[in-house]
Amino acid sequence: MAEAKTMAIPTGASVQAASAPAIPLTQQLPQTKGWKELVRDIWDDNPTFRMILAMCPTMGATNMAINGMAQGLATMVATVASSTTVAALRNVIPAEVRLPAYMIIIAFWVTIVDIVLRAYMPPLSAALGPYVPLIITNCFVLGRAEAFASQNSPGLSALDALGVGLGFTMSLTLLGIVREFLGFGSLFGIQLFSGWTNWVIMIIPAGAFLVVGLYVGIVKHFSPGGQVGGGS
Amino acid sequence: MDIFLIVMGAILTNNILLTTFLGICPFVSGVSGEYASASGMGMAVIFVLTMTIPINWLINHFVLQPLGVGYLSLIVFIVTIAFLVQIVEMFMKQFLPALYTSLGIFLPLITVNCAILGGVLFAIPTWNLGFVQSAAYGFGGGVGWALAIILMAAIRERLRFAPIPEGLKGPGLALIIAGLMAMSFVGFSGMINIRDFGG
Protein backbone atom coordinates (compact mmCIF):
# COMPACT_ATOMS: atom_id res chain seq x y z
CA MET A 1 0.00 0.00 0.00
CA ALA A 2 2.77 2.39 0.98
CA GLU A 3 4.71 1.41 -2.12
CA ALA A 4 1.76 1.92 -4.37
CA LYS A 5 1.42 5.43 -3.00
CA THR A 6 5.11 6.14 -3.50
CA MET A 7 4.71 5.24 -7.14
CA ALA A 8 1.59 7.30 -7.69
CA ILE A 9 2.89 10.83 -7.87
CA PRO A 10 6.40 11.56 -6.64
CA THR A 11 5.53 14.99 -5.26
CA GLY A 12 2.81 13.71 -2.98
CA ALA A 13 4.89 10.75 -1.87
CA SER A 14 7.88 12.89 -1.09
CA VAL A 15 5.67 15.12 1.05
CA GLN A 16 4.72 12.06 3.02
CA ALA A 17 8.17 10.48 3.06
CA ALA A 18 9.94 13.70 3.98
CA SER A 19 7.61 14.18 6.91
CA ALA A 20 9.05 11.21 8.78
CA PRO A 21 12.87 11.16 8.57
CA ALA A 22 13.96 14.64 7.47
CA ILE A 23 13.13 16.75 10.53
CA PRO A 24 15.15 16.53 13.79
CA LEU A 25 11.96 16.45 15.85
CA THR A 26 11.04 13.15 14.24
CA GLN A 27 10.88 11.27 17.49
CA GLN A 28 7.80 13.08 18.79
CA LEU A 29 6.39 15.15 15.95
CA PRO A 30 4.87 12.42 13.73
CA GLN A 31 3.15 11.01 16.81
CA THR A 32 1.21 14.17 17.64
CA LYS A 33 -2.42 14.43 16.66
CA GLY A 34 -1.92 17.72 14.86
CA TRP A 35 0.82 16.28 12.65
CA LYS A 36 -1.34 13.29 11.71
CA GLU A 37 -4.22 15.59 10.76
CA LEU A 38 -1.87 17.70 8.67
CA VAL A 39 -0.43 14.78 6.68
CA ARG A 40 -3.77 13.04 6.25
CA ASP A 41 -5.32 16.18 4.79
CA ILE A 42 -2.42 16.82 2.40
CA TRP A 43 -2.38 13.44 0.72
CA ASP A 44 -4.83 10.76 1.89
CA ASP A 45 -7.79 13.14 1.81
CA ASN A 46 -6.41 15.47 -0.84
CA PRO A 47 -9.34 17.78 -1.58
CA THR A 48 -8.86 17.88 -5.35
CA PHE A 49 -7.79 14.43 -6.51
CA ARG A 50 -9.32 12.29 -3.76
CA MET A 51 -12.44 14.09 -2.63
CA ILE A 52 -13.20 15.86 -5.95
CA LEU A 53 -14.10 19.00 -4.03
CA ALA A 54 -13.61 22.63 -4.99
CA MET A 55 -13.53 21.97 -8.72
CA CYS A 56 -14.36 25.50 -9.88
CA PRO A 57 -11.11 27.25 -8.85
CA THR A 58 -9.20 24.05 -9.63
CA MET A 59 -10.01 24.55 -13.28
CA GLY A 60 -10.60 28.25 -13.55
CA ALA A 61 -7.34 29.41 -12.01
CA THR A 62 -4.79 26.89 -13.29
CA ASN A 63 -3.92 28.00 -16.83
CA MET A 64 -0.54 29.17 -15.47
CA ALA A 65 1.45 27.56 -12.67
CA ILE A 66 1.77 30.86 -10.80
CA ASN A 67 -2.01 31.43 -10.89
CA GLY A 68 -2.67 27.94 -9.54
CA MET A 69 -0.21 28.44 -6.72
CA ALA A 70 -1.61 31.89 -5.84
CA GLN A 71 -5.18 30.60 -5.84
CA GLY A 72 -4.11 27.69 -3.62
CA LEU A 73 -2.31 29.94 -1.15
CA ALA A 74 -5.20 32.43 -1.02
CA THR A 75 -7.57 29.56 -0.30
CA MET A 76 -5.19 28.22 2.35
CA VAL A 77 -5.04 31.56 4.19
CA ALA A 78 -8.84 31.89 4.09
CA THR A 79 -9.33 28.29 5.29
CA VAL A 80 -6.86 28.58 8.18
CA ALA A 81 -8.31 31.92 9.32
CA SER A 82 -11.94 30.75 9.12
CA SER A 83 -11.28 27.38 10.78
CA THR A 84 -9.42 29.05 13.64
CA THR A 85 -12.19 31.62 14.10
CA VAL A 86 -14.90 28.97 14.03
CA ALA A 87 -12.98 26.84 16.55
CA ALA A 88 -12.44 29.82 18.86
CA LEU A 89 -16.15 30.66 18.74
CA ARG A 90 -17.41 27.06 18.80
CA ASN A 91 -18.94 27.37 22.25
CA VAL A 92 -20.56 30.73 21.52
CA ILE A 93 -22.38 29.99 18.23
CA PRO A 94 -25.78 28.31 18.81
CA ALA A 95 -26.11 25.02 16.93
CA GLU A 96 -29.29 26.09 15.09
CA VAL A 97 -27.71 29.02 13.28
CA ARG A 98 -24.21 27.62 12.91
CA LEU A 99 -24.22 27.28 9.11
CA PRO A 100 -25.18 30.92 8.38
CA ALA A 101 -22.70 32.00 11.06
CA TYR A 102 -19.91 29.97 9.42
CA MET A 103 -20.79 31.42 6.01
CA ILE A 104 -20.49 34.96 7.38
CA ILE A 105 -17.14 34.19 9.06
CA ILE A 106 -15.83 32.69 5.80
CA ALA A 107 -17.17 35.59 3.72
CA PHE A 108 -15.44 38.01 6.12
CA TRP A 109 -12.01 36.36 5.75
CA VAL A 110 -12.37 35.90 1.99
CA THR A 111 -13.21 39.60 1.64
CA ILE A 112 -10.02 40.45 3.52
CA VAL A 113 -7.91 38.11 1.34
CA ASP A 114 -9.49 39.61 -1.79
CA ILE A 115 -8.86 43.21 -0.69
CA VAL A 116 -5.24 42.45 0.30
CA LEU A 117 -4.59 40.77 -3.08
CA ARG A 118 -6.15 43.68 -4.95
CA ALA A 119 -4.07 46.21 -3.01
CA TYR A 120 -0.66 44.53 -3.07
CA MET A 121 -0.76 42.22 -6.12
CA PRO A 122 -3.08 43.88 -8.68
CA PRO A 123 -1.90 41.90 -11.76
CA LEU A 124 -2.35 38.57 -9.98
CA SER A 125 -5.73 39.64 -8.63
CA ALA A 126 -6.82 40.59 -12.17
CA ALA A 127 -5.62 37.24 -13.53
CA LEU A 128 -7.57 35.27 -10.93
CA GLY A 129 -10.70 37.40 -11.43
CA PRO A 130 -13.80 36.20 -9.59
CA TYR A 131 -12.17 32.97 -8.43
CA VAL A 132 -10.82 34.63 -5.28
CA PRO A 133 -14.25 35.88 -4.07
CA LEU A 134 -15.61 32.47 -5.03
CA ILE A 135 -13.52 30.88 -2.26
CA ILE A 136 -16.64 31.56 -0.16
CA THR A 137 -18.53 28.79 -1.93
CA ASN A 138 -15.49 26.53 -1.92
CA CYS A 139 -17.00 23.52 -0.23
CA PHE A 140 -14.01 22.28 1.75
CA VAL A 141 -13.68 25.63 3.56
CA LEU A 142 -17.19 25.19 4.99
CA GLY A 143 -16.54 21.45 5.22
CA ARG A 144 -13.51 21.86 7.52
CA ALA A 145 -15.41 24.38 9.66
CA GLU A 146 -18.41 22.08 10.07
CA ALA A 147 -16.66 18.70 10.27
CA PHE A 148 -13.54 19.61 12.26
CA ALA A 149 -13.30 23.13 13.67
CA SER A 150 -16.73 23.02 15.32
CA GLN A 151 -15.49 20.23 17.64
CA ASN A 152 -11.78 20.90 18.12
CA SER A 153 -9.43 23.46 19.64
CA PRO A 154 -8.27 26.46 17.54
CA GLY A 155 -4.68 25.16 17.29
CA LEU A 156 -5.65 21.73 16.01
CA SER A 157 -8.22 23.26 13.64
CA ALA A 158 -5.57 25.58 12.22
CA LEU A 159 -3.29 22.59 11.50
CA ASP A 160 -6.16 20.67 9.92
CA ALA A 161 -7.02 23.64 7.70
CA LEU A 162 -3.33 24.12 6.87
CA GLY A 163 -3.13 20.50 5.71
CA VAL A 164 -6.14 20.86 3.42
CA GLY A 165 -4.80 24.17 2.14
CA LEU A 166 -1.34 22.71 1.41
CA GLY A 167 -2.87 19.70 -0.34
CA PHE A 168 -5.01 22.03 -2.42
CA THR A 169 -2.07 24.32 -3.26
CA MET A 170 -0.02 21.29 -4.30
CA SER A 171 -2.77 19.99 -6.60
CA LEU A 172 -3.40 23.37 -8.20
CA THR A 173 0.31 24.01 -8.76
CA LEU A 174 0.72 20.56 -10.37
CA LEU A 175 -2.20 21.24 -12.71
CA GLY A 176 -0.89 24.70 -13.49
CA ILE A 177 2.56 23.29 -14.31
CA VAL A 178 1.15 20.78 -16.80
CA ARG A 179 -1.20 23.25 -18.44
CA GLU A 180 1.35 26.05 -18.66
CA PHE A 181 4.06 23.72 -19.98
CA LEU A 182 1.88 22.33 -22.78
CA GLY A 183 -0.05 25.52 -23.39
CA PHE A 184 2.77 28.06 -23.47
CA GLY A 185 5.98 26.00 -23.31
CA SER A 186 6.96 27.82 -20.15
CA LEU A 187 7.11 27.22 -16.40
CA PHE A 188 6.25 29.95 -13.88
CA GLY A 189 6.51 32.46 -16.71
CA ILE A 190 10.01 31.38 -17.84
CA GLN A 191 10.10 30.33 -21.49
CA LEU A 192 11.75 26.90 -21.75
CA PHE A 193 11.92 26.36 -25.50
CA SER A 194 12.20 28.71 -28.44
CA GLY A 195 9.79 27.94 -31.24
CA TRP A 196 7.41 25.93 -29.05
CA THR A 197 4.04 25.36 -30.69
CA ASN A 198 1.41 26.32 -28.11
CA TRP A 199 -1.23 23.69 -27.40
CA VAL A 200 -4.17 26.10 -27.40
CA ILE A 201 -6.43 23.34 -26.10
CA MET A 202 -4.56 23.38 -22.77
CA ILE A 203 -5.23 27.08 -22.19
CA ILE A 204 -8.96 26.97 -22.93
CA PRO A 205 -11.55 25.35 -20.58
CA ALA A 206 -11.56 22.03 -22.44
CA GLY A 207 -7.92 21.42 -21.51
CA ALA A 208 -8.65 22.04 -17.84
CA PHE A 209 -11.37 19.39 -17.80
CA LEU A 210 -9.18 16.87 -19.65
CA VAL A 211 -6.11 17.36 -17.42
CA VAL A 212 -8.09 17.20 -14.16
CA GLY A 213 -9.96 14.12 -15.42
CA LEU A 214 -6.73 12.31 -16.27
CA TYR A 215 -5.12 13.29 -12.95
CA VAL A 216 -8.11 11.93 -11.03
CA GLY A 217 -7.98 8.74 -13.07
CA ILE A 218 -4.21 8.28 -12.52
CA VAL A 219 -4.40 8.90 -8.77
CA LYS A 220 -7.33 6.49 -8.43
CA HIS A 221 -5.59 3.88 -10.57
CA PHE A 222 -2.37 3.81 -8.55
CA SER A 223 -3.86 4.17 -5.08
CA PRO A 224 -7.43 2.93 -5.06
CA GLY A 225 -9.48 2.93 -1.91
CA GLY A 226 -9.44 6.65 -1.28
CA GLN A 227 -12.84 8.12 -0.75
CA VAL A 228 -14.30 9.80 -3.75
CA GLY A 229 -16.84 12.34 -2.76
CA GLY A 230 -18.34 15.26 -4.58
CA GLY A 231 -20.30 18.00 -2.94
CA SER A 232 -20.96 21.43 -4.17
CA MET B 1 -32.89 42.48 -29.11
CA ASP B 2 -30.26 42.98 -26.41
CA ILE B 3 -32.20 40.70 -24.14
CA PHE B 4 -32.37 37.91 -26.71
CA LEU B 5 -28.64 38.22 -27.45
CA ILE B 6 -27.74 38.13 -23.77
CA VAL B 7 -29.87 35.03 -23.17
CA MET B 8 -28.33 33.26 -26.16
CA GLY B 9 -24.85 34.42 -25.16
CA ALA B 10 -25.30 33.16 -21.62
CA ILE B 11 -26.41 29.77 -22.94
CA LEU B 12 -23.85 29.25 -25.70
CA THR B 13 -20.81 31.54 -25.74
CA ASN B 14 -20.52 32.28 -22.02
CA ASN B 15 -21.90 28.98 -20.75
CA ILE B 16 -21.52 29.25 -17.00
CA LEU B 17 -20.41 25.64 -16.64
CA LEU B 18 -18.34 24.87 -19.71
CA THR B 19 -16.51 28.18 -20.14
CA THR B 20 -16.27 29.61 -16.62
CA PHE B 21 -16.18 26.36 -14.62
CA LEU B 22 -18.88 27.34 -12.14
CA GLY B 23 -21.04 24.72 -10.47
CA ILE B 24 -18.88 21.79 -11.51
CA CYS B 25 -19.21 19.74 -8.33
CA PRO B 26 -22.79 18.52 -8.89
CA PHE B 27 -21.82 18.17 -12.54
CA VAL B 28 -19.18 15.51 -11.89
CA SER B 29 -20.70 13.87 -8.81
CA GLY B 30 -23.71 11.62 -8.51
CA VAL B 31 -26.22 14.24 -9.63
CA SER B 32 -25.25 14.01 -13.28
CA GLY B 33 -25.42 10.21 -13.24
CA GLU B 34 -29.19 10.19 -13.55
CA TYR B 35 -31.30 12.07 -16.02
CA ALA B 36 -34.14 12.79 -13.57
CA SER B 37 -32.01 14.32 -10.82
CA ALA B 38 -29.97 16.30 -13.33
CA SER B 39 -33.07 17.95 -14.76
CA GLY B 40 -34.40 18.63 -11.24
CA MET B 41 -31.17 20.34 -10.27
CA GLY B 42 -31.16 22.23 -13.57
CA MET B 43 -34.66 23.61 -12.96
CA ALA B 44 -33.71 24.67 -9.44
CA VAL B 45 -30.62 26.51 -10.70
CA ILE B 46 -32.61 28.33 -13.43
CA PHE B 47 -35.14 29.42 -10.83
CA VAL B 48 -32.67 30.64 -8.20
CA LEU B 49 -30.28 32.31 -10.64
CA THR B 50 -33.10 34.24 -12.35
CA MET B 51 -34.23 35.52 -8.95
CA THR B 52 -30.92 36.23 -7.20
CA ILE B 53 -29.12 38.28 -9.85
CA PRO B 54 -31.81 41.01 -10.16
CA ILE B 55 -32.37 41.13 -6.39
CA ASN B 56 -28.67 41.44 -5.67
CA TRP B 57 -28.52 44.09 -8.39
CA LEU B 58 -31.17 46.13 -6.57
CA ILE B 59 -29.39 45.73 -3.23
CA ASN B 60 -26.07 46.69 -4.78
CA HIS B 61 -27.39 49.81 -6.53
CA PHE B 62 -29.81 51.11 -3.93
CA VAL B 63 -28.17 50.10 -0.65
CA LEU B 64 -24.47 49.26 -0.96
CA GLN B 65 -23.39 51.90 -3.51
CA PRO B 66 -25.25 54.90 -1.97
CA LEU B 67 -23.87 54.02 1.47
CA GLY B 68 -20.38 53.57 0.04
CA VAL B 69 -19.93 50.12 1.55
CA GLY B 70 -19.03 48.22 -1.62
CA TYR B 71 -16.45 46.21 0.31
CA LEU B 72 -19.29 44.43 2.12
CA SER B 73 -20.71 43.17 -1.16
CA LEU B 74 -19.45 39.57 -0.86
CA ILE B 75 -20.95 39.07 2.59
CA VAL B 76 -24.23 40.70 1.56
CA PHE B 77 -24.48 38.67 -1.67
CA ILE B 78 -23.96 35.32 -0.01
CA VAL B 79 -26.40 36.10 2.80
CA THR B 80 -28.99 37.27 0.25
CA ILE B 81 -28.54 34.06 -1.73
CA ALA B 82 -28.98 31.93 1.40
CA PHE B 83 -32.12 33.89 2.36
CA LEU B 84 -33.60 33.68 -1.12
CA VAL B 85 -33.06 29.95 -1.38
CA GLN B 86 -34.80 29.57 1.98
CA ILE B 87 -37.73 31.75 0.87
CA VAL B 88 -38.04 29.96 -2.48
CA GLU B 89 -38.06 26.67 -0.61
CA MET B 90 -40.86 27.75 1.77
CA PHE B 91 -42.86 29.29 -1.09
CA MET B 92 -42.63 26.14 -3.18
CA LYS B 93 -43.51 23.87 -0.28
CA GLN B 94 -46.66 25.93 0.27
CA PHE B 95 -47.84 26.60 -3.28
CA LEU B 96 -46.08 24.14 -5.60
CA PRO B 97 -45.80 20.94 -3.57
CA ALA B 98 -45.32 18.71 -6.64
CA LEU B 99 -42.29 20.68 -7.84
CA TYR B 100 -40.99 20.90 -4.28
CA THR B 101 -41.00 17.14 -3.81
CA SER B 102 -39.38 16.55 -7.17
CA LEU B 103 -36.52 18.96 -6.38
CA GLY B 104 -35.99 17.50 -2.91
CA ILE B 105 -32.51 17.99 -1.50
CA PHE B 106 -31.24 19.96 -4.51
CA LEU B 107 -32.90 23.18 -3.49
CA PRO B 108 -31.05 23.78 -0.18
CA LEU B 109 -27.77 22.63 -1.78
CA ILE B 110 -27.98 25.49 -4.25
CA THR B 111 -26.81 28.01 -1.62
CA VAL B 112 -23.29 26.60 -1.84
CA ASN B 113 -23.39 26.07 -5.61
CA CYS B 114 -20.77 28.44 -6.95
CA ALA B 115 -22.72 28.93 -10.19
CA ILE B 116 -25.07 31.21 -8.23
CA LEU B 117 -22.49 33.42 -6.52
CA GLY B 118 -20.37 33.27 -9.67
CA GLY B 119 -23.28 34.46 -11.84
CA VAL B 120 -23.91 37.34 -9.45
CA LEU B 121 -20.23 38.31 -9.45
CA PHE B 122 -19.99 38.23 -13.25
CA ALA B 123 -23.19 40.20 -13.84
CA ILE B 124 -22.75 42.93 -11.21
CA PRO B 125 -19.14 43.84 -10.36
CA THR B 126 -17.32 42.31 -13.36
CA TRP B 127 -19.51 43.23 -16.34
CA ASN B 128 -21.64 45.95 -14.72
CA LEU B 129 -24.83 44.95 -16.57
CA GLY B 130 -28.07 46.94 -16.30
CA PHE B 131 -31.08 45.67 -14.33
CA VAL B 132 -33.02 44.04 -17.18
CA GLN B 133 -29.85 42.74 -18.80
CA SER B 134 -28.66 41.15 -15.57
CA ALA B 135 -32.05 39.45 -15.17
CA ALA B 136 -31.70 38.14 -18.73
CA TYR B 137 -28.19 36.93 -17.95
CA GLY B 138 -29.50 35.16 -14.84
CA PHE B 139 -32.15 33.32 -16.82
CA GLY B 140 -29.82 32.47 -19.71
CA GLY B 141 -27.05 31.40 -17.37
CA GLY B 142 -29.43 29.05 -15.57
CA VAL B 143 -30.68 27.57 -18.84
CA GLY B 144 -27.08 27.10 -20.03
CA TRP B 145 -26.12 25.33 -16.81
CA ALA B 146 -29.20 23.10 -16.99
CA LEU B 147 -28.51 22.30 -20.64
CA ALA B 148 -24.94 21.21 -19.85
CA ILE B 149 -25.85 19.01 -16.89
CA ILE B 150 -28.79 17.38 -18.72
CA LEU B 151 -26.58 16.60 -21.74
CA MET B 152 -23.99 15.16 -19.39
CA ALA B 153 -26.56 12.98 -17.61
CA ALA B 154 -27.80 11.66 -20.94
CA ILE B 155 -24.25 10.74 -22.00
CA ARG B 156 -23.47 9.09 -18.65
CA GLU B 157 -26.66 7.01 -18.79
CA ARG B 158 -25.55 5.66 -22.16
CA LEU B 159 -22.11 4.83 -20.75
CA ARG B 160 -23.40 2.99 -17.70
CA PHE B 161 -22.49 -0.46 -19.01
CA ALA B 162 -19.51 0.53 -21.13
CA PRO B 163 -16.13 -1.08 -20.34
CA ILE B 164 -14.30 1.83 -18.68
CA PRO B 165 -10.85 1.54 -17.00
CA GLU B 166 -11.34 1.16 -13.24
CA GLY B 167 -9.54 4.38 -12.31
CA LEU B 168 -11.58 6.55 -14.64
CA LYS B 169 -15.00 5.32 -13.46
CA GLY B 170 -17.09 8.10 -11.96
CA PRO B 171 -15.61 11.60 -11.69
CA GLY B 172 -12.57 10.98 -13.91
CA LEU B 173 -14.61 10.04 -16.96
CA ALA B 174 -17.21 12.74 -16.22
CA LEU B 175 -14.44 15.35 -16.34
CA ILE B 176 -13.08 14.03 -19.63
CA ILE B 177 -16.59 14.05 -21.18
CA ALA B 178 -16.95 17.61 -19.92
CA GLY B 179 -13.67 18.42 -21.66
CA LEU B 180 -15.02 17.10 -24.95
CA MET B 181 -18.27 19.06 -24.46
CA ALA B 182 -16.28 22.22 -23.68
CA MET B 183 -14.31 21.66 -26.88
CA SER B 184 -17.51 21.65 -28.92
CA PHE B 185 -18.71 24.82 -27.17
CA VAL B 186 -15.50 26.55 -28.25
CA GLY B 187 -17.15 26.61 -31.68
CA PHE B 188 -19.58 29.25 -30.39
CA SER B 189 -16.94 31.50 -28.88
CA GLY B 190 -16.72 35.04 -30.15
CA MET B 191 -20.25 35.08 -31.64
CA ILE B 192 -21.66 37.16 -28.78
CA ASN B 193 -19.71 38.84 -26.01
CA ILE B 194 -21.83 39.68 -22.98
CA ARG B 195 -19.11 42.01 -21.71
CA ASP B 196 -20.09 44.43 -24.53
CA PHE B 197 -23.52 44.99 -23.01
CA GLY B 198 -22.10 46.18 -19.69
CA GLY B 199 -21.66 49.80 -18.74
Image (cartoon, rainbow, N blue to C red):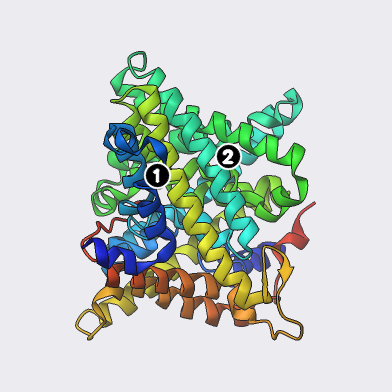
Q: What amino acid is at disc 2?
A: Ile
Q: Residue furthest top?
A: A92
* Whether residue A196 can be seen here: yes
Left or right, A161 with respect to A175, comes to: left
Using the image as rendered, state which of residue A107 and residue A122 is in the foreground: A122
CA gap, disc 2 and disc 1: 28 Å
Which residue, given by chain and number where applicable, does mark 1 sit on?
A140
Residue A108 point in image, percent of width and height: 56, 29
What is the chain letter for disc 2?
B
Residue B55 marker: 2
Image coords of residue B93 (percent x, y) = 28, 40
The image shows residue B180, relative to residue A186, as above or below, that is below
Helix, strand or loop under label 2: helix
Compare residues A24 and A186 and report the one nearer the observer: A24
Residue B141: image location, x then y, percent: 54, 60
Query: What is the residue that sits farthest to the right in this orientation?
Result: B199
